[in-house]
Each structure stands twice: as C-alpha cells, then as structure tokens.
C-alpha cells in the first residue's frame, strides 16, 4: 500500500471519529468531558484486548467463535481463585491460563486435526460456558474481592493513564512489534494468505494457527479480567457482550485500513467504543445499540472497498484453492 | 467451512456394501434406538404417552427451524442467524396479538420478517458474496436486538393462542398433527435433495464451487433460495413457538443455536457418511431431544446438559471429518 492511500484511509478514520463525536456531543454536553473520555478509554480497554486476540486468528484466516464462552470461564476461574484465597497474581494467571489452554485446544483441533474452525469453536465455546457454571452453580462470585486488591487494577493510574488503558497500550505495543516488526508477523500473514506456499517457504503453519488461537483465548480472558475488576464480581454471562463488538472492531478496522492489523483493530475498537459509550451516556437501552452495532458491521463489510471483502471472504474459498 | 468437502470417488460406490460402511451409515439410527430404550428402562415416565407426544411436538418445531440450515451447511456455507430470526418472528406475533391483531395477520407479519431477513442474508451472502459467517452473525444480532426491542427487553405473555394453538394441540393418536406435517415436509425435502438436480447442485457446491460456477449452474440463485428458505422456515418455527409457549420470548434463540448445528452435523453421519442431509437432521433432532429430555428426568442440571450439547457437537464434527478422510483414501 502506498503512502498516500494510508493517508487517505487515516483521514477517513479521523473523519468518521469526528462525525461520531459531533453527533454525541450535540446530544449530550458531557460526551467530550474528561470524565467521559476516561470511561470511553476503559470501555475500549476491555473490547480492545479481546479484539486484539481475535485479530491474530483473522490474520491467519480462521474464525474463533469460542472466545465469549472462554472469557466467561476465565472470569469464573478468576473469581473462584480469589474467593478461595489465592494470591491475586496466581488468580489472574489462572484465569488467563484457562483462556490460553482452551485456545490451544481450538488450535490443535483446527490446525492439527483439520476440524472446521467455525463449528469447532462454537462447540468448545459451548462446553466452556457449561464448565463456567461448575464453580458456583451459576451465581456470581464476589467474596474476598475487596481484600484481594483486584479492584485496584481498575482504579490505579500508570503514567497518568488509567491502568486498564495502560494495559491495553502495553499489550497493543507488544502485539504491534510481534505482528509488524518481526519475521513472526510475516509468518502469520503468510499463513493466512497462502498456507501451501507458506509451508513450502519453511513456515511451520500449524504452529502459527495454534498460537493465534491461544492468543485469542488469552486476550479474551485478559479483557474479562479488566471487566471483573471494574464490576467487582465474576459472572457466568460476563463474556456474552464480547462477540459482536470484537468482530465489528476487527472487520471495521480491516475495511478501513485495507487488511487486519494491530493498528486497524485499535482504530476499529475506538470507533465502536466511541459509539457504544455514547449510547450508554444517552441511556439508550442495549437492544437499540446492539441493532446499530450490527448494522455498522454489515455496512462496514459491504460498503467499503470490494477488494477488502474479497480478501476477507477467502476463508470460504480457501478449500478449493488450497487443494492441490 | 474448511475441510468439509471431499469428493466421493467411484471407490465409494463400490464400497457401498462394505459392512463397515453399512454400520456407519445406519449406526446412527441404532444409537438413537439405544438412547430411547435406555431412558425408557431407567425412567418409565420417559416412554409415557404424554412425554412422547411432547417430544414429537418439540422435534417438529426444531425440524422446521433446522431444515434450511441443513442445506446451507451441506452447500458449504453457514447461517448463524436462524435462531434469532425465529425469535424475531416469535416476538412480532406476540406484540401484534397482544395489541389486538388476529393470529392470521400476526403470523403473516412474522413470516414476512423471516422472509425479509432471509432476503437480506441472500443478498449479502448469495449475491454479493460477502463472508457468510460474519454477515449472519451481524444479521442475527440485528434480528435479536429488534426482537428484544419489541418487548423492551422482556417477554410478552399471551392470553390466548388462537388457531395456531389449536393446530399445535391437535393429535392423531399419540402423534401431534404438526409432527405429521413436518414429516411430510421432510419427505418432500428428501425427494428434492435426492432426485432433483437442485439437490445435486447443493452437494456439488460444497465440493468445488469454482467447478460448479464454470459448469454454468446458477450458483447465486441456489444460495438465494437456501437463505430465503432458512429465513422463512425459521420464522414459521418462531410463530409455532409463540403458541407453544403462549408468550413471546426474545431470547429463545439461545437454546436453539448449539442444537441446530449439532443436529445437522451429527445427523450428517447418518446415511451420507458425513454430509448433512434432511433425514439425518431429523434423526439428530430426535437424538438431542431424547438425550436432553432423558437427562432432565434423571435430574441433570442445565450446565451439565450444556456440556453434553457442546461435547456432542465436537464429537459430531470429529466424526464427520474422520469419515470423510477415510473415504478419500
């Protein structure tokens, strides 16, 4: 992509963001206040971490539908560990570890055993939701939360930023370096673009698909850790609201910037969070905002550059091309 | 979908009488029988007339909802909006009936919504060739949020179930009338799938879409037809559910999502060795309903049954892929 097209795409993104800000600012004077912008950044932190994990899976041209269920399981694992008195760091590691483990299971099933990604991840997500009920029979867990210090994750400030946003920034930086500044990143894209030629170029494609799924599971559980820290309780339904915004963020970003990437996902997340935060501020019920989010997703996929849609449509044509 | 499609070569035809293949082909029905007999022995209430009648009625409604999905997956595409379309039709009927409209008008409106969403999916996936999964996630979420908005986030209870309720309650002996109608629809669908070129195109699409396009088959038109079918039949199921539950439930879709995929994929093992087909789907529905109903009688919790559902889906997918791979060699 040439420098000028990046400029144009960047301008289009800024224009969209400005339109969203203008619309909401005209409806509520509090939208651009520092208090609300901080709330927006918190919202973006949760959504962004889940979307960043998903980005890797989309880059290798697979789908992960299990992460909302996995995130719920991660939340309940975290809550249960805290309630039973485990140190905070162990509890957080446990929650994220569960996510990475189920991600690995997905990766092994899809990459090693060649199971179809969509149905497999729907199934593992369903099992994860079922497992999440075992800790407390489905009731929410909040014992010991105040003493454990998990609430501080939400309240602490790092370098003048709220800690959740600082975590997102840190993770995004690591993901950016991994995906766009190392040969590993090239291997992820090569695996997605043409698996056969990537394999013949010496890329262990199975391993990259596996890692992508593990990162998706871990990202979703890290995201849910922040959500649990801000709400002060772990719920079996914690992950339910992650699916649509994460897919919308990745696809909106990819449509705007020409391909899925860390920057594109962050831009997509910012647009989605700017809208969703505005709806919350105006006290619009979730079912209206859900309708708008899904409409935006449809328009983003259908309306932008047709070449992008062709590229993103590849997973469905891959079988006929990949077969020698 | 990834590796679902593997052409069945002439070797396949030769092996049709191989005992191992006969076992995989019909083993599913044996499993079905074993499940039903086991539960009937463990809990006599399972085999009571009332319970069997109720299971057949639920199976009929689920059968309507999953018929379009069966062919969509058989054609190598996906639809994850079907259950939300059913929920939307369900809520439209409930709102209209609550506000004094007749069941006829309300049902037509619900069916119209199903056709509309079917047409939307058909346009975006069939004509514009956008990725089916993400598009149907989005259209499904749109339908679900409209359904929730209609009831302002809660369910709507209905005082009377009108003629739809009477049709639903009608029985011929132990068998509900609606089950017989759905059975007839499935028989017709089996005929279309096996005897018409339409059916052959569906399976050909999944194996090699490029070749089917090159052969001059109107691929777009087939996909459009499949999504329209899925939308309208799901809406029909939603309308029946409004009478069955005598209420509008905005979130009824959740419980049908895993079940639909499981019935289609697991059922694909029956008769066609891993290819989704309508008789297989019907058998898959009965297996699921039998298992879940029996497990409830044995006192299993919802979360345990959720795990059974998810695991069954995993088993189904693995079996499909395994049997396909073996047939390829």
Image (tube, grey):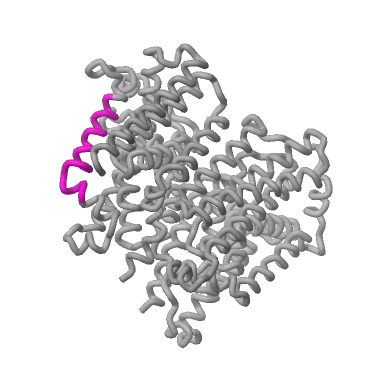
Point out residue A113 in the picture as x, y percentages from the top left corner. Answer: 33, 63
Q: Is residue A182 magenta?
A: yes
Q: Quadrant of residue A143?
A: top left
Q: Is residue B53 left or right of residue A284?
A: right
Question: In the rendered view, would you say A284 is above or below B144?
Answer: above
Q: Residue at x 51, y 61 (%)?
A: B73
**Which quadrant is home to the C terminus of chain B?**
bottom left
User: In this picture, which residue range is highlighted in magenta?
Assistant: A166-186
Question: In the rendered view, would you say B307 is above or below A171?
Answer: below
Q: Quadrant of residue A31?
A: top left
Q: Residue at x 33, y 17 (%)?
A: A155
Most common secondary structure along the magenta stretch: helix
Outermost residue to the front: A4
Point out residue B202 in the picture as x, y percentages from the top left corner. Answer: 54, 68
Point out residue B150 in the picture as x, y percentages from the top left corner. Answer: 66, 34
Viewer can see residue A220: no
Q: Residue at x 33, y 43 (%)?
A: A258
Q: Is residue A178 magenta?
A: yes
Q: Quadrant of residue B103?
A: top right
Q: Residue at x 70, y 65 (%)?
A: B185
Q: Is residue A275 left or right of residue B254?
A: left
Point out residue A33 in the picture as x, y percentages from the top left corner. Answer: 40, 12
Total marks placed: 0
The answer to which of A7 and A172 lies nearer the viewer is A7
């Amino acid at each position: 992509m040439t420098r000028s097209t990046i400029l144009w795409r960047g301008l289009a993104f800024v224009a969209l963001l400005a339109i969203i800000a203008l619309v909401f600012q005209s409806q509520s004077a509090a939208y651009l206040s520092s208090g609300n912008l901080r709330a927006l950044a918190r919202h973006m932190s949760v959504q962004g971490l889940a979307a960043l994990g998903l980005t890797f899976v989309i880059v290798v041209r697979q789908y992960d539908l299990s992460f909302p269920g996995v995130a719920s399981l991660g939340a309940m694992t975290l809550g249960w560990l805290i309630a039973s008195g485990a140190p905070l760091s162990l509890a957080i590691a446990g929650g994220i570890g569960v996510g990475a483990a189920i991600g690995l299971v997905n990766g092994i099933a899809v990459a090693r055993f060649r199971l179809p990604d969509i149905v497999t991840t729907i199934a593992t997500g369903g099992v994860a939701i079922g497992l999440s009920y075992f800790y407390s029979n489905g009731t929410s867990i909040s014992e010991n939360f105040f003493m454990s210090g998990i609430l501080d994750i939400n309240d602490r400030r790092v370098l003048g930023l709220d800690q959740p946003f600082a975590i997102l920034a840190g993770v995004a930086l690591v993901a950016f370096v991994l995906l766009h500044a190392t040969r590993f990143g090239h291997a992820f894209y090569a695996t997605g673009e043409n698996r056969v030629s990537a394999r013949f170029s010496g890329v262990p494609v199975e391993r990259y698909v596996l890692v992508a799924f593990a990162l998706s599971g871990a990202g979703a559980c890290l995201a849910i850790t922040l959500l649990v820290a801000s709400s002060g309780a772990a719920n079996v339904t914690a992950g339910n609201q992650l699916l649509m915004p994460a897919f919308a963020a990745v696809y909106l970003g990819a449509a705007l910037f020409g391909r899925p990437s860390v920057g594109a996902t962050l831009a997509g997340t910012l647009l989605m969070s700017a809208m969703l935060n505005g709806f919350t501020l105006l006290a619009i019920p979730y079912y209206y905002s859900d309708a708008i989010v899904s409409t935006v997703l449809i328009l983003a996929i259908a309306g932008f550059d047709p070449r992008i849609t062709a590229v993103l449509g590849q997973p469905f044509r891959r079988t006929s091309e990949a077969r020698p | 979908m990834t590796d679902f499609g593997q052409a069945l070569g002439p070797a396949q035809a030769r092996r049709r009488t191989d005992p191992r293949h006969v076992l995989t082909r019909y083993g599913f029905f044996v499993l079905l029988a074993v499940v039903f007999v086991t539960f009937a022995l463990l809990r006599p209430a399972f085999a009571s007339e009332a319970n069997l009648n109720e299971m057949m009625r639920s199976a009929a409604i689920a059968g309507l909802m999953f018929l379009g999905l069966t062919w969509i997956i058989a054609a190598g595409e996906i639809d994850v909006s079907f259950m939300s379309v059913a929920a939307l039709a369900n809520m439209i009927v409930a709102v209209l009936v609550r506000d004094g409209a007749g069941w006829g008008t309300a049902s037509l409106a619900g069916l119209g919504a199903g056709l509309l969403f079917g047409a939307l999916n058909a346009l975006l996936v069939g004509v514009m060739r956008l990725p089916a999964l993400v598009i149907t996630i989005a259209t499904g979420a749109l339908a679900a949020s409209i359904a929730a908005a209609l009831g302002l986030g809660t369910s709507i209870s209905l005082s009377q179930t009108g003629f739809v309720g009477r049709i639903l309650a009608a029985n011929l002996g132990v068998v509900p009338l609606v089950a017989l109608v759905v059975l007839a629809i499935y028989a017709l669908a089996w005929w279309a799938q096996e005897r018409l070129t339409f059916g052959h195109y569906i399976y050909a699409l999944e194996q090699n879409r490029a070749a089917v396009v090159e052969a001059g088959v109107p691929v777009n038109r087939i996909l459009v037809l499949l999504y329209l079918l899925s939308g309208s039949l799901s809406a029909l199921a939603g309308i029946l559910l409004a009478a069955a539950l005598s209420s509008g439930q905005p979130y009824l879709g959740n419980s049908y999502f895993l079940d639909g995929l499981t019935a289609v994929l697991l059922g694909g093992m029956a008769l066609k060795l891993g290819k989704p087909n309508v008789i297989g789907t019907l058998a898959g529905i009965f297996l699921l309903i039998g298992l879940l109903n029996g497990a409830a009688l044995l006192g299993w919790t919802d979360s345990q049954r959720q795990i059974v559902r998810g695991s069954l889906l995993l088993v189904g997918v693995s079996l499909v892929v395994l049997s396909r791979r073996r047939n390829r060699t």
